[in-house]
Image (tube, grey):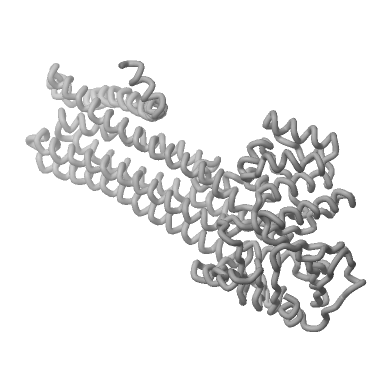
Amino acid sequence: MLLLIKEYIMQKSIYRHVLASLRVFAPQVGGVAFVAVLFYFSMLVLAYLRGYSIDVLTSALTFHDLLKIACTFVVLGLFYFLIAYFHNMSRKKLQKKVGFHLRHVVLEKIRVSDYQEVYRTGETLNILALLESDIPKISRLSTMIVDVVINVIELVVVLFLLYTHGLLVCALGIAVLICSIVSVHAFSKKMEITSACVQKTWDACLKNYQQQISQCKNIRLLGIARLYKKYEDALERYMSLQAVANAVYGASVGLIFLIEGPEVVKGTFSIGVIVTTVALLGEIVNPCYIVVSNIQEAQAIRSSILRFNMVLSLPDDREFAKTEKDSTIFKAVDKAILLDQVSFRYKGTETNIINNFSVTATKGGITFLRGGNGTGKTTLLLLIAGILHATSGYVHKYVGEHDKKSNVASVFTDMEIPELPLQSLIEELECDALWLQEKSPQLFDADLLERFNTSIKKNQILKGTSLSAGQKQKIMFLLVLAQRRPILLLDEAFSSMDANSKRYCYELVREELKTSLFCCICVTHTEESLAAQDVMIDIAFWRTCWLFGKACLQKARICDGDATQSLHMVF
């Protein structure tokens, strides 16, 4: 029976919660006992020095009274422990939930190129980690000390209200009032420092993301912004629990003052009423201020999210639904992507990077986007991926029965291999391991293949610094393609590969177009050899051509003039 109970406790991690709570509870109760004894004897010395009789303080302490003091310590100590236990347990559950969410949801929403950046700035993505980063640790330490001192004095006040009267009662009541004011000030300072830390981190995030946008890196901003909203909801629940615990504690101590105070002060009943009223007000003001501060913090987080969305030009839910609406018209037609009169400009600018552009990508072939620097090729990919949203027009995507939240896979030229164990990375990306095992020997040379397989078997990190640019592109291309998503976006993904490797990569893409892949859109600066179902779109001159066989762009350009009209005619 004992073994079963022990196994149940181990499985439920109850013992860890108890130990964690004891770490909070034991110093607090120990400090209470020590300071209570110290304070009591200090009052004896003070009474002696002022010429008061100490008989009142000593003669009343019978065995029954000492038992009452012990019971008071036990009851209030138990209450402290329960608050610490449930507070710790709820915090652990929330952190576990948030950590799981960060690992399995955020990384699913963010493109592969950003895994390394996400892990590097993981603390900035987790609001709970923000509140427990280096700056708030200072405020937590100071407020913890103040809280312990306040709790000690409150306990001492309760004990002395039970066994003393007159001047000491009045003095202790004033002490409680002062400590309540100090507590409010300390908590206010803590919130101020924490808010500054959060604000500083938000600003750093925004600056970082804006820089990455300007460099055309593939950031899943919408997924991050929506995740912050989920954190906000979880944080509000956590703060509400904390506020309720503080309110219950304050009410309990206040009731002790109200019930016990007037009875024990006897001849100084009026002073006792004043003291207990002041103490009760102090105990009510503190948790009420905590509740208000929690609400203000939640509002600050909400406003930060709104500002985050505004800076990144992210639309609200209605606009998002409008720009990403289901293209049911595609069901009867062999089409995968349609950009319909799409225009886009970045926030704060007046010039459209893309202006009234329409294009259709069909199933079964590769659609090449060709053009010089600054012609909007990468921006088009970001619009299709849902990372950016059109200023006007529509982006339609139809990918059959696939999950629309994860229907796009992207490979960018500047992608780095995430600093994660390779086997864990494959699992996080939900790659087809058998497909990888089959295709990797055909793309990798012997040395790279051995390092790749060894890293998988030993679940080691495959360091990108020890690989050439072409080797990194090969690995990232295979990992992304192994996700078997219906839409594949390639932004100069093969720029550092040799000719044979590049040719094989295109063959792999065309093989997948016959099975799981709906369509592929590829950005390139060079002239690529086209297969029968491929399309080349010249972005720079708004020209398109439909080429059959392995012809080159200059050899067969059959569509000139208005790109929109030509595309609709050809498709």
Q: Whole-percent x and y of residue 112?
A: 67, 49
Q: At 54% across and 69% down in the image, what residue appears?
A: 325
- Compared with 531, 559 (above or below) is below
- Decide which of 357, 287 is in the foreground and name it: 357
Image position of 342 (left or right of 126): right
- Decide which of 199, 336 is in the foreground and name it: 336
Residue 352 appearing in the image: no
Q: At 73% across and 44% down in the image, what residue appears?
A: 417
- Compared with 209, 562 (above or below) is below
Task: Tell me which corner region of the image, top left, top right, bottom left or bottom right, holds residue 161.
Answer: top left
Q: Whole-percent x and y of residue 76?
A: 25, 31
Q: Whole-percent x and y of residue 110?
A: 62, 52
Task: Tell me which corner region of the image, top left, top right, bottom left or bottom right, holds residue 103.
Answer: top right
Q: Whole-percent x and y of residue 270?
A: 11, 43
Residue 127 appearing in the image: yes
Image position of 24 (left or right of 495): left
- Compared with 476, 548 (above or below) is below
Q: Which image quarter is the N terminus in?
A: top left
| Image label count | 0
* Residue at the far right in the pictured view: 555
- Decide which of 66, 402 is in the foreground and name it: 402
Q: At 33% across and 46% down in the image, what residue appears?
A: 243
Image position of 403 (left or right of 571): left
Q: Which image quarter is the C terminus in?
A: bottom right
